[in-house]
Amino acid sequence: MLSRFATNKLTSVRLAVAKHLLTDAETLKTLCIDSDKEVAAAAAGNPKFPQEAMTLIAQQEELEQTSKLENLSNLKWEDLAEFLLHPDFPTEGIEEAFLQNDYAVRFSCAMHPNASDHIRNEILNQEQNWLKASIALNPMTPESTLRELANIKDFDIAFALVTNPNLPEDLQLEFANHPDRTIRLHLADQTNSHAVLSAIAAHPSPKGMHTGLEQLLAIAINPKTAAAKLAALQTVTHISRSEGEVLATCISNAIVNHANFPDKLIGRYRFIIGNYLKKTKLFN
């Protein structure tokens, strides 16, 4: 009966068969390449699934990937995502996907590191500034283009530019004094420049805020701040996050890089300290 139910049109029925502990190996081999991903995964995870049939799954995945690659210009975002989010996806594939008349897809193509000059120029010639933000996000965008984009007074472009890891420090300093606080605080979470953080910290916090992030940041980047105060900052930062401010990564980074970083905080910062020890410290 289970083998007969394995061909049922209803996904829920096939899923029940795939999970059933009495389903035989041959039926599980059929279900492991089911068109429904949940059914296929359940069959492969069944204790009775024959391990030698793993090649069937690999073959099915290869066929699906090949089919998608052959139809890039027609795929929707959910299918394209696995390609466009992969750093090594080739320029030729990005070019083909870019042919779609879908703004979300074209945005994703333009922000990919392997996007061509043709795609960059095509997007820069569009009227929508939010589309141009994709070029501002692209880490391979030439500095000259980043400077041109910085001259456009637009929130989406500014937010994208301060996200770009290759934004020159002089432009970061300009955005550190951006009239919109959201841009300034987002930049604080991205930069590793003491000068930029100092400029952001110099801005007053909004009226009515007991202790704004700017005030906390000023303490975190001050080389004279004592270890005890740095330890207290970590708790305050979490409170600040819960009140709706930015993630405050800038404060965590500054504390880790501080000359007076207290050893007792190593456990709390174990997930980020390794990365920052490899980088140039703020207070060398």
Image (tube, grey):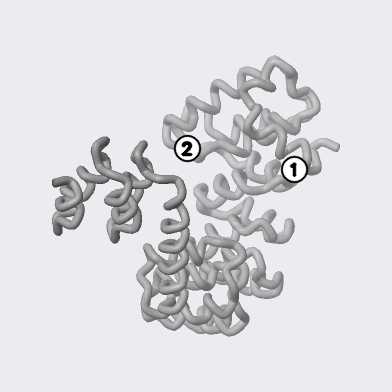
Horizontal side of residue 77 vs 16, given as left or right: right
172 versus 134 height, above or below: above
Q: Name the disc covering residue 116, or none.
A: none
> Residue at 47% of width from left, 37% of height from top?
245
Amino acid on which the number 1 mark rests in the picture: His
Q: Nearer the viewer, residue 73 or 14?
A: 14
C-alpha separation, residue under disc 2 versus residue under disc 1: 21 Å
- Which residue is at 71% across, 30% downward? 256
Tag 2: amino acid: Glu
Mark 2 packing: few (<14 Cα in 10 Å), some, or many (20+)?
some
What is the quadrant of the C terminus in the image? top right
Q: Residue at x 54, y 54 (%)?
A: 179
Asked if 158 appears above or below 129 in the picture, the reply is: above
Q: Which residue is mark 1?
A: 194
- Viewer-closest of 100 and 214: 100
Q: Which residue is mark 2?
A: 245
Could you tell me residue 282's position as x and y percent?
A: 78, 39
